Image (cartoon, grey):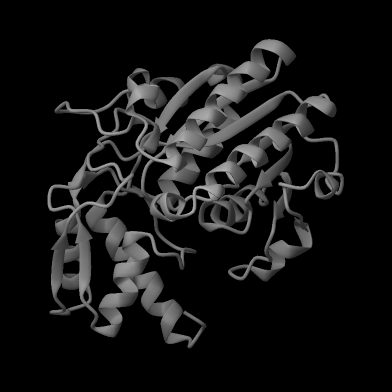
Amino acid sequence: MRILITGSSGTAGTRLFEQLLKRHEVTGVDTKRNTWHPYLNAHTINADLRKKRDILKLPKNFDIVIHLAANARVYELVKEPELAFDNILIHFNVLEFIRQNNLKRIIFASSRETYGNIAIRGTISEDMAKIENCESPYSASKISGEAMTRSYSEVYGIDFIIARFSNVYGMYDNSDRVIPLWIRQTLRGDKLVVYGKKKFLDFTYIDDTIDGITKMIDQFDNAKGTTLNIAYGKGLDLVSVAQGIRKLLKAKNEIVIEESRPGEVWRFEGNITKAKELLGYEPETGIEDGLKKTVAWYKDFYSTDKDS
């Protein structure tokens, strides 16, 4: 297949790119070069998808577009809401690129942030997302993207799958997401700040996330027109995650509890029944094994004296 990945130099984009390139013709597009796997740059177009002139750089003949590109740090978009507008603009431009070139398939990377804070016990299924629960500019940008995707399907016949990802962690992430941030801070002996004592989230190891996407590609017709939770399916409190990282690194740095920050979801545990039924999706890596793999990868990465 001929596949376009937007945001191909990011965390999920890099892992997906390297896996798909083994059996498909793949083109990446990103504003920055890939620092993790330089060989991917030979297959990457450097472009700013906010700009129509840059979109003209893209080839026109793809079987499917996997749209990952976004400003994805929730609290950054609380501080700088114009980054949420960028997400909306990029998604609109990608949909227009698909429409104008008569392409027919898109997988859109949405987020569990679209659910907001639902006051229920148990897992959260795809039909529970409601606009009135929107917590942040980031979640608003993802809800907008989902609505635009569905509208283009209705009007222009573009088939879609919407994937709501949940706290992806693992290799190729040097951001301030909690797990890579806490690993770096623990290696330095810094304190770990947990924003929200009762914060309880569903962490998905990167290879399970990528497996979900590849299954969407392979079984697109079986799942088209749907929204799917791609998560592990079990929640865990953030204090336990911090303690797990500290234990793996044999550290005793302080864990500090502070109030949850504005715009952040404090509880999510995904119901993944639909993804199991339509795709045969079965996440394999729980948080204990996932943290072991992630810590081992980061220890190896930093031991090579690469830029942190």
* Front-lying residue, 138 or 210: 138
Q: Is residue 222 shown left or right of residue 100?
A: left
Residue 93's spot in the image, x, y percent? 72, 36
* Front-lying residue, 185 or 211: 185
Res. 214 image quadrant: top right
Q: Residue shown at 78%/35% (left/top)?
A: 62
The image quadrant where one finds the N terminus is top right
Q: Residue shown at 43%/27% (left/top)?
A: 228
Image: 138 above or below 161: below
**Residue 220 seen in render:** no
Q: Residue shown at 39%/73% (left/top)?
A: 298
Residue 66's spot in the image, x, y percent? 63, 38
Res. 135 image quadrant: top left
Image: 58 above or below 153: below
Residue 226's spot in the image, x, y percent? 50, 19
Q: Is residue 62 shown left or right of residue 56?
A: left
Residue 122's spot in the image, x, y percent? 17, 28
Q: Is residue 203 shown left or right of residue 103?
A: left
**Residue 150 seen in render:** yes
Image: 128 above or below 42: above
Image: 276 above or below 41: above
Q: Is residue 265 shown left or right of residue 308?
A: left
Q: Residue shown at 63%/47% (left/top)?
A: 20
Task: Determine the residue located farthest toward the bottom in the rendered image.
Answer: 305
Task: Determine the residue located farthest toward the top in the rendered image.
Answer: 154
